[in-house]
Image (cartoon, rainbow, N blue to C red):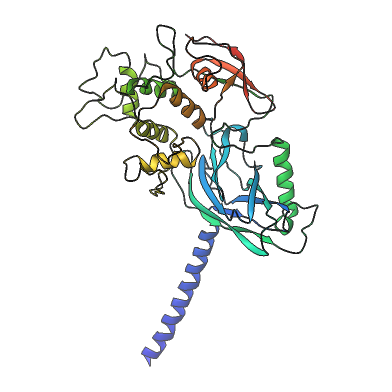
Amino acid sequence: MKKNKIIPFILVTLIIVTVISSSIMSVSASNIFKVEIADVQGKQGDTVEVPIRFINVPEEGINSCDFTIGYDENVLELIQVKPGSIIKNPNSNFSYNSPKPGRTVFMFTDETGHGREIINSDGEFARVTFKIKTSSKEQSSAIIPDKWTFANYSLKSFSTEFARGSVRVSSVASNPDTPGGSGDSSENQSDNKDSDQKDNEDTTDVINQPDVQVPGSQGQNNAYLRGYPDGNFKPENNITRAEAAVIFANLLEVDRNNINISKNISYTDLKEDHWAVWAVKYVSDIGLFSGYPDGSFKPNNSITRAEFSTVVFKFLELEDYGQKTDKFKDTVGHWAQQFIERLSELGYVNGYPDGTFKPQASIKRAESVALINRALKRGPLYGTEQIFPDVPKSYWAFGDIAKGVLNHTFTVDEEGREFLLEILNNN
């Protein structure tokens, strides 16, 4: 008899525990940060807007994020992307590009570096405008998230759930007063109105071009490289490892007279009186550069396209997804394959018409400046006089070189181009 009483008691206890556990799990799950891509509807030839919303933004806020969405290019044509109302200073902190049809990459980083413009509230992160192709059939075309990373101010990543969206191609007309049809609620329209008021310009990006900025806005950039003592820039010269080290140290605005090196950095071929020793030690200390197995740095050797791409990857603190697409036939199995492919996906580096990247080829000074500016969303700089006798205004990288060698202020015109306002003290 006692045994029969004990069994029901155990069953009741298990049920209670299960219910409580389920409730706890439900509450916990409800607090997980989510990215929601909306479902919308439209007809063939319609233009629809798809909101992307952040829900349950962590208390510490989002300092940076990077994610990709995929869609059927046979059904949808990307028209433009607008930053949402939860993004502060979108012209500096928000960007996107489409490395190939059917894929769009979104990027956000608080460029203040002090957490002043992190995302700290729920709401619309971006609004994507698609045109439904007239050749598409009646169907539900999925918009699928892929490859994402989200981090707080301490650069620690946190869990993220994605809810995929879709565009339903229907024979029923969507409400002409409601872009996006059934997927747009009145709340969404309000969010979009706020976004439009803050960012009324067309932010359509172009691969390998800087982000479009607000016309009339002004900014300032400091020089990060110089010409040679003879007054020339030598744009076709290969850039050396020492020169590259100085460039990145300058970009980090390091005071060469007051450098804090945490490690005992030394190379067998780098003397203390070398002109770039301060920069080489600093960039090695923070992990941007490394030496060779024999203990040397080879400061006067030309830096390769693979090496330079790797440094840019590290400098931008990009995420290594560990996935390879074998995009370039001569980088398959190369130690820098993932870094090169990631930069290529973002539109920062290009290969050659024959399908190669030439990772072991040396990178020229002009090429390196153009790559850096592209990755930092800078320039080229217009409205400057000729600076170097060997870099005429007709030279393809004239504006990029000017952007890199001048301390200057600039303004942005209606086409998003940066024009020189004033050359500052270059000492």
Where's residue 379, x and y in %? 56, 25
The foreground one among 358 and 265 is 358
Where's residue 206, x and y in %? 59, 37
Q: Residue at x 52, y 47 (%)?
A: 67
Residue 202 appears in view: yes
The residue furthest right is 177
Q: Which quadrant: the N terminus?
A: bottom left
Q: Is residue 129 above or below residue 264?
A: below
The foreground one among 31 and 131 is 131
Q: Residue at x 58, y 42 (%)?
A: 120
Q: Quadrant of residue 303?
A: top left
How many numbered dots are placed on residues in this image? 0
Q: Is residue 310 above or below residue 141?
A: above
The foreground one among 284 and 204 is 204
Where's residue 188, x and y in %? 71, 51
Residue 155 appears in view: no
Q: Is residue 276 above or below residue 283?
A: above
Side of 401 relative to 5 (left or right)? right
